[in-house]
Image (spheres, rainbow, N blue to C red):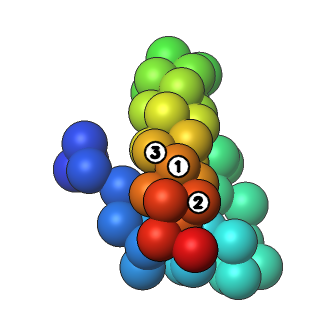
Amino acid sequence: MNNNLTIYDLNFILHKKIDFFDLVDLHSRNWYFQDFMNNLRKFQQKSCIKH
């Protein structure tokens, strides 16, 4: 799994109707969610700077 969450990954997760977290075990889920939130904050910060 790639550590860098791209905008395409974000769109995929948000728009697909599948339950993404069914595909990973509990440990990976927790790690991925933390990584996801960290990247989301970074993305929001970048967006705030641009606008």
Q: Give the quadrant of the C terminus.
A: bottom right
Q: Are marks 1 and 3 in contact (CB under 8 Å)?
A: yes
Rendered position, 18 above or below 37: below
Distance between mark 2 and mark 3 Cα atoms: 10 Å
At 58% from the left and 60% from the top, the residue drawn is 48
Q: Which mark is residue 10?
A: none
At 56% from the left and 42% from the top, the residue drawn is 41
User: Please, what is the three-letter code of the amino acid marked with disc 2?
Assistant: Cys
Image x and y of residue 13, in percent: 61, 68
Q: Which mark is residue 48?
A: 2
Secondary element at tag 3: helix
Q: Which mark is residue 45?
A: 1
Quadrant hosting residue 9: bottom left
At 73% from the left and 60% from the top, the residue drawn is 19
Q: Disc 2 or 3, which lies upstream in sequence? A: 3
At 52% from the left and 49% from the top, the residue drawn is 45
Say which residue label 3 marks.
42
Q: Nearer the viewer, residue 32 or 45?
A: 45
User: Which of the two marks, 1 or 3, is nearer to us in this view?
Assistant: 1
* Residue 25 seen in the current view: no
How many labels, in total?
A: 3
Q: Are marks 1 and 2 in contact (CB under 8 Å)?
A: yes
Image x and y of residue 17, in percent: 77, 79
Rendered position, 12 above or below 49: below
User: Which of the two marks, 2 or 3, is nearer to us in this view?
Assistant: 2
User: Please, what is the three-letter code of the amino acid marked with disc 1?
Assistant: Gln
* Residue 22 seen in the current view: yes
Distance between mark 1 and mark 2 Cα atoms: 5 Å
